[in-house]
Amino acid sequence: YMIWTNFPFESINKDLSAYQLGAYVLDRLGIDKGIFNTFHQNRINSENYHRELHALQFDVLFGENYIASKVYDTKEMQMGLFEILIENVMQNDEKQYILGKNFTEYSVLEVDGKRVDTDYVSSTKLVTEKVDDFETIQVFQVGMKDVVLRESNIYKVNKPQD
């Protein structure tokens, strides 16, 4: 491999495999972060290097991910910058209008926990067929393979007491 830089970098001839090259260059630049990067930089000359590398790869790809769970803390994440908010629900004889904030083309409605066909009108309005006698509505941002990326507040309908 030949590395070309736009800054002074001492030329060194070294025999490396392609999977070792990135860690080697980053080490020369003083960067030592990352599980595999650190492994290659610290264990490349060890007697059990390839056996340990295989075990590390297996753990990350197919195992219990022991090494990453010790290195990285898990964080609760959500998609998007802004909260999805249902502010009001209105209806006429045929349609139900969900008014709120931050709806997208990927917004899907659930009425009493059941998905309903949803039409996106704008970032503040969704429309569906009228549903009689329901208690809750919620909006979900849904990605590929029906994965929920973010959800709105649960809008509860105030029903008159008998």
Image: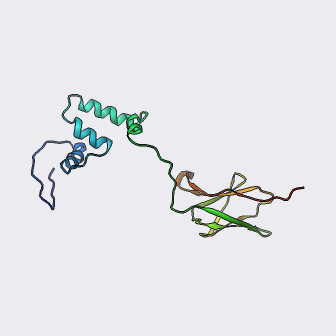
Residue farthest to the right, as pictured: 162
- The residue positioned 53% from the left and 56% from the top of the image is 143
Relative horizontal placement of residue 57, taking residue 2 as reference (left or right): right
- The residue positioned 15% from the left and 57% from the top of the image is 4
Residue nearest the observer in this picture, 61 or 44: 44
Q: Quadrant of residue 73?
A: top left
- The residue positioned 51% from the left and 62% from the top of the image is 81
Q: Quadrant of the C terminus?
A: bottom right
Q: Where is residue 58 drawn, in percent x and y? A: 36, 34
Q: Where is residue 16 drawn, in percent x and y? A: 17, 42
Q: Quadrant of residue 142?
A: bottom right
| 120 versus 156 height, above or below | below
| 108 versus 36 height, above or below | below
Q: Where is residue 101 drawn, in percent x and y? A: 61, 67
Residue 95 visible in the displayed image: no
Q: Where is residue 136 drawn, in percent x and y? A: 73, 56
Relative horizontal placement of residue 78, taking residue 114 as reference (left or right): left
- The residue positioned 24% from the left and 48% from the top of the image is 22
Residue 137 visible in the displayed image: yes
Q: How many marks?
A: 0
> How has the structure been colored for display?
rainbow
Residue farthest to the top, as pictured: 47
